Image (cartoon, grey):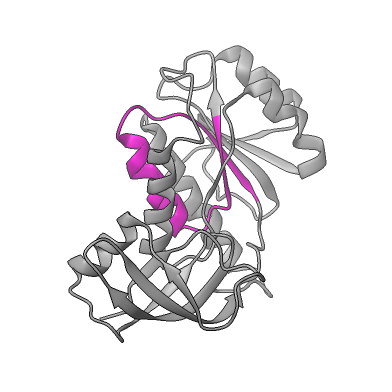
Amino acid sequence: MSALWVHVESLGAELEANAIVTLSADEARHVTARRLRVGDRLVAFDGAGRTAEARIESIGRRAVEVCVEAVVQAPAPEARWVLATAIPKGERMAVMLPMLTQLAVAVWQPLVLEESAVRDLDVESPRLRRILVESAKLARRPWLLEVRPPCALAALLDGCDAMGGLWFGDREGDTVGIPTDAAIVAIGPEAGFTADEIRRLQAAKGRAFSLSPHNLRIETAAVAAAAVRIAALRDEPGISRS
């Protein structure tokens, strides 16, 4: 069985070697649920690229302490492309975010569009934070998925020139892969981008792509686009397979 990953607030330079860290109540529950014991080993991570081998120092009724050993800094994601999508309803977002984390998406940009059913998202909410942490633990990923505050299409397009290539999902688009120079990949709501939004995307030199001849839910299209994008990236010479 692989070592349990536990989240801690920081593994920064201020943390001394063999420092004792108290786990949060949520993380402590994972330790006790696995019936781990004092001396068992696990992996601590802070979501900012730092991981450390650790061992359980003590297990109390209300707290679990771990001894953090040498900290390793993982490089930042090489391809900081942005996946911008309409916001899925309810629990569908909690389904999408773990998959995007597993598929090495660096940044998710929630979009508010003309046909959006959901028009707001609290990116500071404890629930969203828990989803991101649990997603990273499941994926064994040192970096949390970055979730930006929701924005309108105009704000997204304002940054296109600086970032590079723009692609957007449309059933009438080219049925081709998403190239590695696609810095922004945009996915609309189930109803699709409106005609006016498509004109604005095209005016920003966006290129349409199609993932299916059928209508896709937001989370389906997002995960499919991420899978196509990472497959193309991993075929590029010199790109890390980690």
Question: Toward the viewer: 84 or 166?
Answer: 84
Which residue sits at x=62%, y=12%?
Answer: 196
Q: Position of residue 212 (x, y in %)?
A: 41, 39
Horizontal side of 113 relative to 200 (left or right) equals: left
Which residue sits at x=65%, y=69%?
Answer: 14
Q: Quadrant of the N terminus?
A: bottom left
Question: Toward the viewer: 205 or 110?
Answer: 110
Judge whether 109 appears above or below 114 on screen: below
Q: Quadrant of the C terminus?
A: bottom right
* Res 186 quadrant in image: top right
Which residue sits at x=45%, y=25%?
Answer: 189
Count of number-bearing discs: 0
Tell me if residue 90 is in the magenta stretch: yes
Q: Position of residue 54 (x, y in %)?
A: 43, 80
Question: Toward the viewer: 163 or 35?
Answer: 35
Asked if residue 212 can be seen in this view, the reply is no
